[in-house]
Amino acid sequence: MARSLRFRRAKVAPDRLAAYLAAVGRAAGRRERAGQHLWLFRHAEHSDIFVEFREGPDAAALAPNAAEAELEWFADYPEDDGAVWLEVRPDREPSPDTR
């Protein structure tokens, strides 16, 4: 089954970092219990910039849950376009010349 992915870039003020990380932990736990994932990465040079990745079975599963809505209290999301990315499995995708 193909998976879906959504990512958001977040900017977190230093005084909100502890609360943000705690909220991400709660949101990730909720995703794990649903058989999904939430991963968090920090920018190598800018410690206030993060990327959140949500992964699930389809686009509908990537809608923010209650725990993820809490993240918006602690972070700014300046570039969130709401795009959903679908998994590509090269061994299962038709080649360009056979479409």
Image (tube, helix red, strand yellow):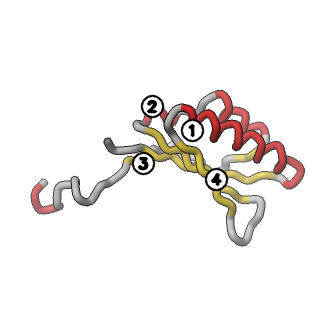
| Residue nearest the viewer, comparing 37 with 99 | 37
- The quadrant of the rendering that contains the N terminus is top left
Find out whether the residues at labels 3 and 2 contact each other: C-beta distance under 8 Å: no
Which comes before the other along the chain, label 1 or label 3?
1
Q: Which residue is mark 4?
A: 40
Q: Residue 98: percent from the left, percent from the top?
A: 10, 57
- Please rate how many residues cluster around mark 4, counting C-alpha atoms within 10 Å: few if below 14, some from 14 to 19, many from 20: some
Quarter assignment of residue 33? top right
Quarter assignment of residue 4? top left
Q: Which residue is mark 3?
A: 85
Q: Which residue is mark 2?
A: 60
Q: CA distance from mark 4 to mark 3?
A: 17 Å
Residue at coordinates 49% horizontally, 36% vertically from top-left?
35
Mark number displayed over residue 32: 1
Q: Residue 87: percent from the left, percent from the top?
A: 37, 50
Q: Residue 57: percent from the left, percent from the top?
A: 41, 38
Q: CA distance from mark 4 to mark 1?
A: 14 Å
Mark number displayed over residue 76: none
